[in-house]
Amino acid sequence: MDRARRGDGAAFGELVRANQEIAFRTAYLITRNAADAEDAAQDGFVKAYRALHRFRPGAPLRPWLLQIVANEARNRRRSAGRREALALRAAAQAPSGGAAPSPEGQAVAADERRRLLELVEALPEDQRLVVALRTFLDLSEQETAAVLGVRPGTVKSRLSRALERLREAHA
Amino acid sequence: MPELETRLRALGAELELPPAPDLAARVVPLLGAAERPQRRWALRLALAAAVVLALLGAVLAFSPGARSAFLEWLGLRGAVVQLVDELPPVTPSQSLEALGERVTLEEAERRVGFDVLQLRGQGRPDAVYVKEPGLVSLVYGRDLDVRLIFSQVAATIDEGFVFKKVGTRGTLVEELTVDGARGLFLTGEPHVFAYMTPDGDFHDEPVYLARDVLLWERGPLTLRLEGELTREQALELAADVR
């Protein structure tokens, strides 16, 4: 980090490598378009490099990076066209644990997962995103707040409303 | 209760997300061109100060993130008005969070380092928000019945905020003179309010769904007054700040 702050591009490259997966996924959940998400993450990292002198030493890096990438992603979401739907991996196996389930059991489990995903996708945009960031990507409350540009308390209350809604819809 | 969250986390692991590209390989070669941050910031501010569109081409070349978004710019020092075809999504319920942290007036002055102006005849503001490094907003009225928001920012080359208004073509922007200084009055269709930080990032979410807005300069400050106002009412209030 110190080397990157002093202008060492290779050191910054290591930071990018360590965070590129989560940055891209975050951008993708916002833009829902792989090409836009790639651009957003790339430009976000370049901006972050340029703004490194403003980064408070000792503060966690990831929320700050993700915030910059998310801003880029939002700028693209507005101008972009096609939005891709989230899909489950075709070869997704039943969750681990216990003996191998029967083919029927697997089919039921796969159906349930598809249904849950549909319910998430049907949430209002702000709730959908908070669920996706907190649970699909496992971002912390602080990281999610940075991405959404809201306070951590808002993340908590929004997530709780979203989960409530999912429970009702799933009942 | 947590069972649903557990299932959602498991679902996340099974999502078919596109593979992340090797961003490090792409980003590192770009870093040489990304140096000299101060210069870029100065250029941004110069753009904000530009009267109208002469630099549009430069903006487009300069800000790849906004390739198609920039149709028109109108600016004051520390303020930019951008007209686009479509507004970004707005969540009015978050509105006041966009103004920053709620503090006392005295605390706001301490943080921004200038004497905060007030609207004479409106009494004490009901709430004061500050967003560092230099944006102060006085809110008159409460909760869903906010009558006026009066924001001020000291915009300099080195640091400061830039107000950014995003409106559609239905937003009317009128240039006028406030107390001898340049001003802009925005009315017509709703527009949104966002801000730009010194590192050049526009933070345009959460956004505030703006009503009629007067933007003007006064001494070193750029001021912004928002409410359901006619042009005359806005000018009257603006003439009476202290």
Image (cartoon, rainbow, N blue to C red):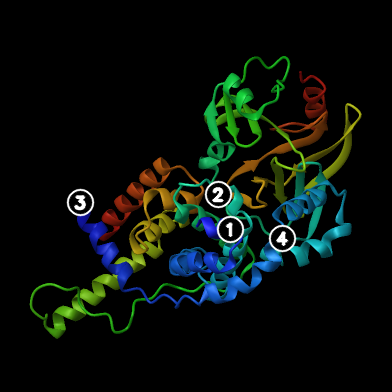
Q: Which residue is mark 1?
A: A48
Q: Which mark is residue B1?
A: 3
The amino acid marked with disc number 1 is Ala
In the rendering, at what x and y percent does residue A160 appear?
33, 47
Q: Which residue is mark 2?
A: A55
Q: Which mark is residue B85?
A: 4
In this rendering, position of residue B99 left or right of residue A152: right
The amino acid marked with disc number 2 is Phe
Considering depth in this image, is A151 or B86 the residue closer to the camera? A151
Mark nearest the camera among 3 and 1 is: 1
Mark nearest the camera among 4 and 2 is: 2
Query: Do discs 4 and 3 belong to a common subunit?
Result: yes
The amino acid marked with disc number 3 is Met
Query: Do discs 2 and 3 belong to a common subunit?
Result: no
Name the element at disc 4. loop
> Separation of disc 3 and disc 1 at Cα?
38 Å
Mark 2 chain: A
Q: Is residue A57 above or below residue B239?
A: below
In the rendering, at what x and y percent does residue B120 appear?
73, 16
CB atoms of marks 3 and 1 within 8 Å: no
